[in-house]
Amino acid sequence: MATLKLLSFLILQIFCILEVANSQGVELGFYKKTCPNVEAIVKQTTAHYISHAPTLAAPLLRMHFHDCFVRGCDGSVLLNSTKGNQAEKDAIPNQSLRGFQVIDAAKSALEKECPGIVSCSDILALAARDAVELINGPTWAVPLGRRDGRVSILLDALKNLPTPFDNFTTLKTTFGSLGLNVKDLVVLSGGHTIGMSHCFSFSSRLYNFTGKGDMDPNMDQNYIGRLKIKCKPGDVTTIVEMDPGSFKSFDTDYYTMVSKRRRLFASDAALLTDSQTKAYILSQVNPYGSTFFKDFGESMIKMGKIGVLTGKAGEIRKHCAFRN
């Protein structure tokens, strides 16, 4: 009996050790010995593409965000659909994502340098950081060591991604379920300072806000007038600048535009309905006293740790769009 108890105890201890090994977190310098040039290679690749197409920065940042909010930061947003299974990439919120070629090019370069070592999810986290920095935004240290997930399901994206139509309560719940607080919510929303949006993401605010053919009273009426010139009822193809005049530059204009009620998304306007997020917005309006760049880096690091696969979990894909 004593022997059986000892054996059971030893098995349990071994199991616990394996569990800890498989759930260890990401860390700085993870590839120091196995692929020391990983960050330089990803940055060089990202810079090559951004120098030719600066507008790729916004979708690369958004891609990382969408990856982390669905099944954690596991690169599942990069996977192609397979027969009988539609992947996250094909969900409506992800159909406008661009920049997959940047991730593929970086992966190809890294496979030549250190084959089978660097995950696609880590490449995406680095490329998002580098893309922001390359358009005059902040930079931050990216902890690495993520592994790639094997599962990607379209419905997961539809269920878990925030939408442009969300009110504050919904946003707070969505972010909170992932361990992100209200400050993270208002800070990460500042990523909307770059990029473009299709008219259908906000047209209800222009033409049919409450179902009675009315406009959103929480949107600047002069701004609505200008948007109506570009976006006609039922328009599903036209795209509009998220930050008029500076949509290619990462800056604090997002908060200025929110404070003036000149943002496209209802979800951005919703940030004025909460005292904490409203106070943060107003504190960032003066760029010389802004803490946005520092705060953004901190929240991106926090977001990048959501649901990561480490240790022996997942895999290291050979090609980012396909499982091994």
Image (cartoon, rainbow, N blue to C red):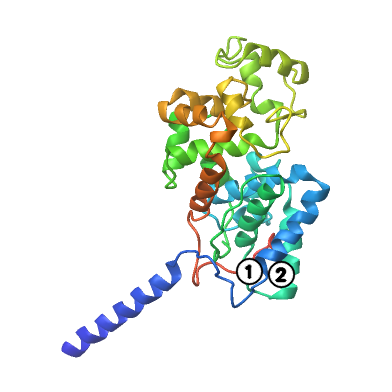
Q: CA distance from mark 1 to mark 2?
A: 7 Å
Question: Taking 68 as reference, is 202 above or below it?
Answer: above
Residue at 65% in and 14% down: 207
Could you classify mark 2 by the number of other residues whose Cα lies within 10 Å: few (under 14), some (14-19), or many (20 or more)? many
Name above or below for residue 80 compared with residue 27. Answer: above
Mark positioned earlier in the residue sequence (1 or 2): 2
Check disc 2 and give the amino acid type. Answer: Leu
Horizontal side, residue 228 vs residue 184: left or right: right
Q: Quadrant of the N terminus?
A: bottom left
Q: Quadrant of residue 260?
A: top right
Q: Residue furthest front?
A: 288
Quarter holding residue 320: bottom right
Circle count: 2
Check disc 2 and report its element: helix, strand or loop. Answer: helix
Picture quadrant where residue 11 is located: bottom left
Can you say which quadrant of the picture contains the C terminus? Answer: bottom right
Judge left or right: residue 35 versus residue 276: right
Q: Mark 1 is on which residue type?
A: Val
Location of residue 197 in the rendering, given as x and y in whole percent from the top left corner: 69, 32
Camera-nearest residue between 121 and 56: 56
Q: Badge 1 is on which residue?
A: 118
Residue at screen point 50% across, 67% down: 310
Residue 139 pos. (x, y %): 61, 51
Question: Which residue has dot 2 on it?
Answer: 110
Q: Position of residue 124 (x, y in %)?
A: 64, 56
Tag 1 near tag 2, CB within 8 Å: yes
Asked if one can make out residue 85 in the rendered structure from this viewpoint, the answer is no
Q: Is residue 28 visible?
A: yes
Q: Residue at x 34, y 74 (%)?
A: 16
Residue 205's spot in the image, x, y percent? 61, 18
22 in relation to 298, above or below: below
